[in-house]
């Protein structure tokens, strides 16, 4: 992880596998300031309690006592910023998504089964942190052109990412 003052040049920061981050106190302060200045943070590829527990700890360090996450309903504005998304589906990494004999269709453990879109709200009620729990939007976009990768997952990922990026730039 390398977070410095350059972060303020970007309104939208996207982090994959945040459970693996080893944030220093300086990184934590930069991310806190980034969000306080109106920045938007998207955390993706978080599977099961094994990943979610350290992500919640990271968010608690960054956001302090205000680290509450809320599940976004499919009615939330972010879900409809450009594309109308009617359901939250699970997007899996390529190894599982393209395994047609795999009986278990989740990552890490059974707590990785149910996909959720979680959000932290800023003082104005706008989403400023988006957490993709039990989902891998990055893999969905990465494998978009592979005919073996489930098309529904790839398309959902692109739509969700575009909605998130546009929402982050307009709120």
Image (spheres, grey):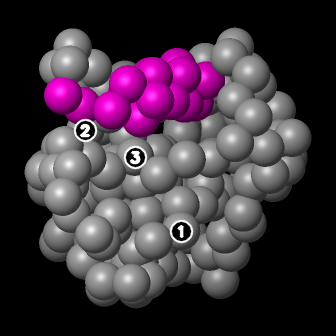
Residue at the image position 17 percent from the left and 51 percent from the top: 99
- Spatial CA distance of label 1 from label 2 is 17 Å
Q: Is residue 155 magenta?
A: yes
**Residue 58 visible in the picture:** no
Question: Please, is residue 76 above or below residue 1 in the view?
Answer: above
Dot 2 and dot 3 residues touching (CB under 8 Å): yes
Judge by depth and name the residue closer to the eye, 83 or 131. Answer: 83
Residue at numbered disc 1: 114
Residue at numbered disc 3: 91
Q: Earlier in the sequence, mark 3 or mark 1?
A: 3
- Spatial CA distance of label 2 from label 3 is 8 Å
Q: Would you call the spot at circle 1 few (<14 residues within 10 Å), some (14-19), or many (20 or more)?
A: some
Question: Horizontal placement of 134 versus 70: left or right?
Answer: left
Q: Would you call the spot at circle 3 few (<14 residues within 10 Å), some (14-19), or many (20 or more)?
A: many
What span is colored magenta in the figure? 148-165
The quarter of the displayed image where residue 121 is located:
bottom right
Q: Secondary structure at mark 2?
A: helix
Dot 1 and dot 2 residues touching (CB under 8 Å): no
Q: Earlier in the sequence, mark 2 or mark 3?
A: 3
The quarter of the displayed image where residue 123 is located:
bottom right
Q: Earlier in the sequence, mark 1 or mark 2?
A: 1
The quarter of the displayed image where residue 147 is located:
top left
Q: Secondary structure at mark 3?
A: loop
Question: Please, is residue 143 above or below residue 75 in the view?
Answer: above
Q: Position of residue 41 (x, y in %)?
A: 48, 45
Q: Which quadrant would the N terminus be assigned to in this image?
A: bottom left
Q: Which quadrant would the C terminus be assigned to in this image?
A: top right
Q: Position of residue 127 (x, y in %)?
A: 70, 46
Q: Position of residue 18 (x, y in %)?
A: 29, 62
Residue at numbered disc 2: 139
Judge by depth and name the residue closer to the eye, 39 or 136. Answer: 136
């Amino acid at each position: 992880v390398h977070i410095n003052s350059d972060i303020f040049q970007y309104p939208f920061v996207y982090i994959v596998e945040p459970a693996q981050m080893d944030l220093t106190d300086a990184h934590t302060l930069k991310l806190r300031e980034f969000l306080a200045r109106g920045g938007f943070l998207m955390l993706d590829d978080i599977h099961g309690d094994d990943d979610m527990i350290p992500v919640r700890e990271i968010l608690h360090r960054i956001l302090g006592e205000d680290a509450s996450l809320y599940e976004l309903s499919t009615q939330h504005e972010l879900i409809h910023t450009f594309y109308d998304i009617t359901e939250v589906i699970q997007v899996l990494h390529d190894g599982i998504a393209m395994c047609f004999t795999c009986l278990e269709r989740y990552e890490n453990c059974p707590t990785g089964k149910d996909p959720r879109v979680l959000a932290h709200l800023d003082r104005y009620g706008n989403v400023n942190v988006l957490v993709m729990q039990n989902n891998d939007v990055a893999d969905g976009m990465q494998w978009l052109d592979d005919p073996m990768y489930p098309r529904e997952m790839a398309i959902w990922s692109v739509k969700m990412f575009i909605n998130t990026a546009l929402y982050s730039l307009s709120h």
